[in-house]
Image (cartoon, grey):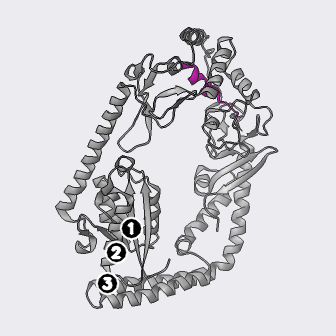
Amino acid sequence: MQGDYIIAKYIRLSMDEAQSDSMSIENQRLLLDKHIADMDINNASVLEFVDNGHTGTNFERPAIQELLELVRQGRINCVLVKDMSRFGRMMIENGYYLERVFPMYRVRFISVCDGFDSTDYEGGTGGIDMALKSLLHEHYSRDLSLKIKSAKRAKMLRGESVRKNCLFGYMLDEKRKMIIDEPAAVTVKLIFKLALEGMSITDIAKQLYKEKRPSPSTHKGLKSNTGYVWIPSQICCMLRDEQYIGTYVAGKVENTAIGSTTTVPVPESEWVKIPNHHPAIIEKDVFFKIQETIAKKAPKRKRNVTTHQRYGRSDSPLKNKAICGCCGHTMRLNHTQNKRFSCVFTLVAPDLECHKLSVDGNELESTVLQTIHSHMQDSFKHSDSQTGNNADCAEIIARIENSKRVLYEKLILSEINASEYRTEKSKLDTEHEQTKQKHGISHKSIENISVNDNFKQDTLNTNKLTRQAVDALIDKVYVYPGNRIEVVWKTPIR
């Protein structure tokens, strides 16, 4: 980054506000740029962070997370937003950052349209006025969410499409009406025909793969290296979907909370159903015959003692970390006496490389642990030669940061002016950066070197892979045929 003073301008636009010119990204940018010009700060650099199409009811936004990470690294001096609602619409979360996070990292926060500048309030949140505005933003967001939910419900009752994507076998015309997608409809008819003939779901999936029928995701143009693999559960859902006989169905799920992307199923009695809404692909008598067949199928054999009771529930620190290196899908951990990770996605594709790929869970854990030990031993050899340099570097950096704090206190006490403060701080920042580059180690790793060494030593002394070690060090473990693995590290082991 260039410049002594780093300004981060944050711009946000939700999908529901996209039609409002006053909220457009360009208008926000022009407003913030004008305010930055009026600030008249010498040698300042400006970074821009934009979240387009993200709600303000939570902070799970990519650009705001990137900005906050730079704040935690001490690389941002000022955060600038159009108004408080652009930063966030929840009063408690906004207050946390304004009262705790930004003051701790000495970050100035400016909300242009609210007339709020944290330097005027000594790290406070602007008193009752800003508190009321934050509360209004939060209630506005809740009210808007309820209105959107009501509007979607009204659209459902009118039989209008409320989803971006259409059911496989259909597509939306220019008026967003459901019409038959002929190439996909041929596959849908084949699935129902095979089911009517008594073929099992798994055998149908195998037949579709044999005939190289594109899966729904492949048909929609999504990238996939297994574009003809059909998941049996996907076929089962299709066979139960009344939309294939022309019935409009909507409202199957709902969001768990305002701003949340997590959904939960809604009872079928509350779904919106409109018969004869669109052209049918499957005849009603065929559809209902298949439903009778599904209902008449014998239930699974009940056992007095379940697999879990016989062997206990299998678990592994690599659960959800083991990935098939061929198709990229998460490998399933079975619950039997012999703990194994298996790729079940390509069970219907016998010619694919990862067909029936599996690996012994204990062997995989042992191999990963040996890999971790090997990397840590190498890092200890390197760190032994660097220990003296790191200690000197840490001492110098501690002295520089103490000088920065003393300098800032002088500015607050009016013992020096802003120009003198910037000049001296620039010198200290330069010395800080040169020290880090000279010793080839980051400030963060210096602060945590003793913790890292203790953690590495504990891991080296254990002969069993732990969840703590996996969560701290490993992002993914790719498994390939021939018991070959590739470990993707979450963070470098230094």
Classed neighbour count for the residue bearing mark 1: other residues with Cα under 10 Å, few (<14), some (14–19), many (≥20): many
Residue type, mark 1 in image: Lys
Residue at 65 percent of width and 44 percent of height: 223
Observer-side mark, 1 or 3, equals 1
Q: Out of 10 and 380, give the one closest to the viewer.
A: 10
According to the picture, the residue beneath numbered tag 3 turns out to be 409
- In the rendered image, the vertical position of residue 45 relative to residue 125, given as above or below: below
Secondary structure at badge 1 equals strand
Residue type, mark 3 in image: Glu
Image x and y of residue 140, in percent: 25, 47
Residue at 53 percent of width and 29 percent of height: 167
Please report the bounds of the magenta region as a residue range: 228-240
Q: CA distance from mark 1 to mark 3?
A: 26 Å
What residue occupies the far left of the structure in this picture?
128
Instruction: Please tell me whether the stretch drawn in magenta is mainly helix, strand or loop.
Output: helix
The tag earlier along the polypeptide, 2 or 3, is 2
Left/right of residue 429 with respect to residue 451 in the rendered view = left
The tag earlier along the polypeptide, 1 or 3, is 1
Observer-side mark, 2 or 3, equals 2
Tell whether label 1 touches label 2 (CB within 8 Å): yes
Image x and y of residue 118, in percent: 27, 71
What residue occupies the far right of the structure in this picture?
482
Q: Out of 338 and 174, give the one closest to the viewer.
A: 174
